[in-house]
Amino acid sequence: MNKKLLSRFLAIPAFAFLLVSCVAEKDFDNSAFETVPPENLSSAPADDPVPAADVYRAKFETSRGDFVIEVHPEWAPRGAAQFRKLIEEGVFNEARFFRVVPGFMVQFGIPGDPKVSAKWRNNTIPDDPVIESNTRGMVSFATSGPNSRTSQVFITYGNHGKEGAQLDSQGFSPFGKVIEGMDIVDSINAEYGETPDQGQIQQQGNTYLNEKFPKLDFIKKATILPEEVETAESPEEKSE
């Protein structure tokens, strides 16, 4: 992906650019992933302790099929905790994959219900340091600037080389990875590209998307999978 094409993907309104001018390189604006900034950015200090948590898996049942994301809190503890909360509260259910850029990423996480969207739009969390790189299948939160992660996430489609390194350097911290069904993620409908307007989605939810972009793929249900428990074999089983 060349710089000119990447810049088009990441073009943003002038007011949003002001939020990230201190970190964005001139040819790569990270804030475009979430073009409607939260009204209140997190004031919590980034060094607040985060409780330790175990790796968990989340299943996404979609209009294209199912995929599974394995979440690693040791990569990005705040992001991992926020993602689990979003799933447990059903925020992703019926949410559309509203932004799909082939070869780059697919984005989702604006709730279909505007009332739910209003609640989560300002539920920001402090940034996590970048431990893992934004390579194929990795899952990170979208941002509109420092400490602005809310409910929007994206799955990376490819190994981007320099572009991926820039995502890393500008604070996109992966918290999980697609471990099953990446072919499903690859097949998500991309015909609308970046056309759906995030502001309209937040204000009108799926009413707007169903009317203007009826063929968008969507999440039917997202759930936390039960932990796999290893059981010791009995003496009889071992002797067979």
Image: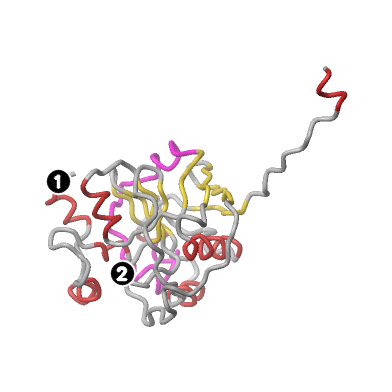
Q: Identify the residue at image location x=59%, y=59%.
A: 53
Amino acid identity at mark 1: Asn
Q: Identify the residue at image location x=31%, y=47%.
A: 191
List the residue tagged with mark 1: 2
Reply yes or no: does residue 72 show up in magenta. Answer: no
Up the image or down, 153 lies above or below 155; here it is: below
Expressed as whole percent of the image width and height from the top left, the position of residue 120 reads 47, 73
Expressed as whole percent of the image width and height from the top left, the position of residue 188 reads 40, 44
Q: Work out whether residue 53 or residue 71 is closer to the camera in this orientation and state it.
A: 53
Up the image or down, 229 lies above or below 73; here it is: above
Residue 169, picture quadrant: bottom left
Reply yes or no: does residue 183 show up in magenta. Answer: yes
Expressed as whole percent of the image width and height from the top left, the position of residue 20 reads 24, 71
Which residues fall within the magenta stretch?
181-210
List the residue tagged with mark 2: 144
Up the image or down, 146 lies above or below 80; here it is: below
Expressed as whole percent of the image width and height from the top left, the position of residue 139 reads 42, 52
Residue 102, picture quadrant: top left
Q: Are marks 1 and 2 in contact (CB under 8 Å)?
A: no
